Amino acid sequence: MKSCCEGKSGELAELRASQGKVLKILLALNASMFFIEFTAAWWLGSTALLGDSLDMFGDASVYALTLYVLHRSVRERALSALVKGIMMLALGVIVLGEAGYQALHGVAPAAHGMGAFALLALTVNLVCFGLLWRFKSDDLNMRSTWLCSRNDIIANASVFGAALLVGWTGSRWPDVLLGAAIAALFLQSAWQVIRDARVELREAKQTQSAQAPNAPASSCASRSCCVPSTATGVIEPAHASGSGSSKCCR
């Protein structure tokens, strides 16, 4: 029997190729912005800008992980999403700690520079958000990546608003409070991604356990060639996580 997933496999390969091109662009943009914004944050003494730069670093890591698992199994992509969630959680804790330190010992940052770099970061993240929009419902990994981009836009706009307030009041508190708010956003999003990843891992394990006793050693006759992703309904070829065999089932 010819491959019963031929059409779906072609569609999936085309989708993964499109996702890969976009993720490479996002990786380059976010890695570049991390170095720019991190340097500016220390130079200007801005907690909020520092938090935003760490977010850029987290996003660059997220895009690298997503590229790594792009052509792998549903289980491996769910594990990648779990790692992303843990990274987001760690970043939230770091920014929260920095906000606490600045609340006790900090001074008001340079408002004009803070606002200028926040606008630059906002422009970059709007480009990223636009590139990710059509992929946001493809699977858990692309959805978690889109959520990161959405959070970035909120954070960038907030940093710019905080810069205006710092310039108006001459106080460090708008910067400190925004740093804490960015940390809270990281923590909330991290919990959402970790929760979804755990659900998908559990469902993937149940699906694998249910199929294992029924799978014959040398025939595709008794199992479906395509397995739907439990989280999104995207059709996944049964051999997607295999060693590269052209057969439908191993």
Image (spheres, helix red, strand yellow):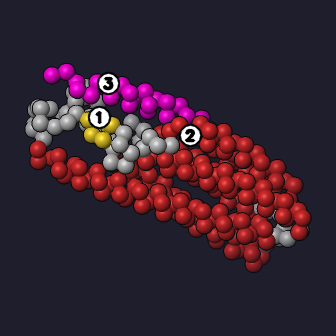
Q: Which mark is residue 237?
A: 1
Q: Which residue is mark 2?
A: 133
| In this view, 217 is above or below 198 | above
Secondary structure beneath dot 3 equals helix
Counting residues from the start of the chain, the first of labels 1 and 2 encountered is 2
Q: Nearer the viewer, mark 1 or mark 2?
A: 2
Tell me if residue 15 is in the magenta stretch: yes
Secondary structure beneath dot 2 equals helix
Q: Position of residue 125 (x, y in %)?
A: 66, 45
Name the residue nearer the viewer: 130 or 59: 130
Label 1 and label 2: CA atoms lie apart by 24 Å
Q: Which residue is mark 3?
A: 7
Residue type highlighted by circle 2: Trp
Q: Position of residue 113 (x, y in %)?
A: 84, 53
Secondary structure beneath dot 1 equals strand
Q: Residues within 10 Å of mark 1 (few under 14, many from 20)?
A: many
| In this view, 18 is above or below 190 | above
Q: Residue at x 23, y 50 (%)?
A: 207
Residue type highlighted by circle 1: Pro
